[in-house]
Image (tube, rainbow, N blue to C red):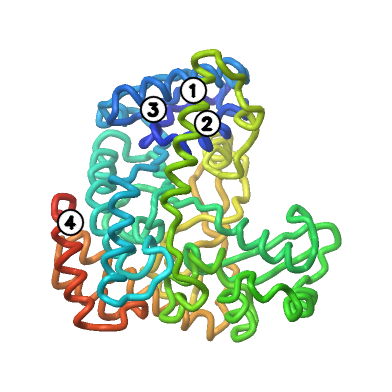
């Protein structure tokens, strides 16, 4: 008998991320007969997303049953997998998270997962996440919550501490790190195998190997990096020279956790580009649905995200290794706190998600990451308790924050901007 399941996609109206999930769902036949329930708040956008999903489902022969609803609570009834990618007023609030701290002299890189921006992403995101999770505890307590929303580490940490719902965060950062080192050593990305452990957007590549021969590529990386274009990844390369390991998935992401991250650039996120890309994607969707354009060929190919691989592995008990997942530590990385959210390889099977321990991190790397673990823990406490006092403490222990006066000023301003979304989760 073929195994079937119910998947709920929270945030299905996202023009960009929705396409990624659709690519994976409809380029596979592993979930044939299963039900996909798409959930969104905007009725018009949700209807468009449902039409696109049905078109891709028919075109690919993936064999899913497609439904949509704005009633997220009832959608959870009987669900086995919840894909979460919601965000509150993403670009408008993120831009303020970036601009307000700079006004008070804070130098930062992205303002999303670390620094003041990471704090306010946490403060406004966790109440929404806990709304979903508390309802899951009532309606589908055995379901797996698959999170794609940022701040990944803080969401997984909060659920690890305050919910019994099974949770894994998924991120393609490990592949960004692999691509960066592959470019430096001059090999195709698919020929380079990496194993990483650490924090989300801040993993330590404990091994870099040639996939064909198994040869250790770290000696070649050290040799090639010395004469590589100095404008490429200066922060990551400075850390590589200092600590002996490649850390993270790009200077912008890693820089969010460092007092000196801004030295590699303070450009911030390119909101104008983002809006342009979203507009292009939406126009393409409209043209495809209206019959004015063919379905882009790559919409029916895998995206590289791992949600569908996880779901299929659990559903069919395949014991699938997933290169990277964000999980509650519980000593998977023994020299980081047990109550941290870490990113490590995971095994997925019918029993759920099993973190794979690569052993302790190099001592200096663990100490570097432990600084950020403390920040994340305090930010989560501030968010779940809606505490402005704890939020100030989280800012004052964050290495990105260089002034107590600036911390108080930006906290007052951004707290008022986000007041509507901040509430106690306990």
Rendering coords of residue 237 (x, y %)? 62, 77
Query: Are there few (<14), some (14-19), or many (20+) residues within 10 Å of tag 4?
Result: some
Does dot 2 land on a helix, a strand or a loop? Answer: helix
Give the mark nearer the N terminus: 2 vs 1.
2
The residue pinned by badge 1 equals: 53
Rendering coords of residue 149 (x, y %)? 39, 49
Q: Pointers 1 and 3 in contact (CB under 8 A)?
A: yes
Rendering coords of residue 383 (x, y %)? 22, 61
Residue placed most toward the observer, 176 or 131: 176
- Residue 44 in the image: above or below residue 273: above
Quadrant of the image containing the N terminus: top right
The residue pinned by badge 4 equals: 417
Rendering coords of residue 22 (x, y %)? 52, 31
Give the mark nearer the N terminus: 1 vs 4.
1
Residue extending farthest right: 213
Query: Are there few (<14), some (14-19), or many (20+) residues within 10 Å of tag 3?
Result: many
Query: Are there few (<14), some (14-19), or many (20+) residues within 10 Å of tag 2?
Result: many
Is residue 72 left or right of 371 when viewed as pictured? left
Q: Pointers 3 and 2 in contact (CB under 8 A)?
A: no
Q: Foreground mark, 4 or 3?
A: 4
């Amino acid at each position: 008998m073929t195994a079937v399941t119910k998947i709920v996609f929270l945030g299905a109206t996202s023009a960009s991320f929705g396409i990624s999930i659709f690519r994976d769902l409809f380029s596979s036949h592993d979930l044939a007969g299963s039900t996909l329930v798409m959930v969104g708040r905007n009725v018009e956008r949700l209807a468009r997303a449902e039409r696109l999903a049905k078109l891709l489902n028919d075109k690919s022969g993936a064999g899913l049953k497609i439904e949509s609803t704005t009633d997220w609570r009832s959608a959870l009834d009987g669900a086995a997998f919840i894909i979460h990618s919601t965000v509150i007023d993403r670009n408008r609030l993120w831009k303020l998270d970036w601009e307000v701290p700079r006004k008070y002299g804070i130098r930062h890189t992205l303002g999303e997962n670390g620094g003041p921006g990471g704090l306010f992403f946490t403060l406004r995101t966790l109440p929404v996440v806990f709304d979903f999770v508390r309802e899951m505890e009532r309606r589908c307590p055995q379901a797996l919550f698959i999170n794609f929303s940022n701040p990944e580490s803080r969401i997984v940490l909060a659920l690890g501490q305050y919910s019994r719902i099974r949770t894994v965060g998924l991120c393609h950062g490990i592949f960004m790190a692999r691509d960066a080192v592959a470019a430096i050593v001059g090999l195709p990305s698919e020929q380079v195998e990496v194993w990483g452990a650490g924090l989300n957007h801040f993993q330590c590549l404990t091994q870099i190997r040639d996939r064909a021969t198994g040869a250790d590529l770290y000696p070649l990386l050290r040799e090639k990096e010395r004469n590589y274009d100095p404008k490429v990844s200066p922060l990551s390369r400075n850390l590589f020279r200092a600590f002996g390991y490649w850390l993270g998935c790009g200077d912008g992401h890693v820089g969010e956790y460092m007092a000196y991250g801004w030295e590699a650039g303070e450009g911030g996120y390119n909101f104008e580009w983002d809006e342009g890309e979203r507009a292009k994607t939406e126009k393409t969707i409209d043209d495809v649905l209206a019959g004015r354009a063919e379905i882009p060929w790559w919409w029916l190919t895998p995206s590289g995200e791992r949600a569908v691989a996880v779901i299929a592995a659990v559903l069919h008990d395949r014991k699938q290794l997933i290169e990277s997942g964000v999980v509650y530590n519980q000593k998977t990385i023994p020299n980081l706190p047990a109550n941290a959210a870490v990113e490590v390889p995971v095994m997925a099977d019918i029993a759920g998600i099993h973190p794979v321990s690569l052993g302790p991190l190099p001592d200096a790397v663990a100490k570097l990451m432990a600084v950020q673990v403390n920040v994340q823990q305090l930010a989560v406490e501030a968010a779940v308790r809606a505490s402005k006092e704890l939020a100030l403490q989280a800012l004052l222990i964050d290495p990105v924050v260089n002034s107590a006066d600036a911390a108080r000023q930006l906290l007052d301003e951004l707290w008022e901007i986000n007041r509507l979304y901040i509430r106690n989760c306990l």
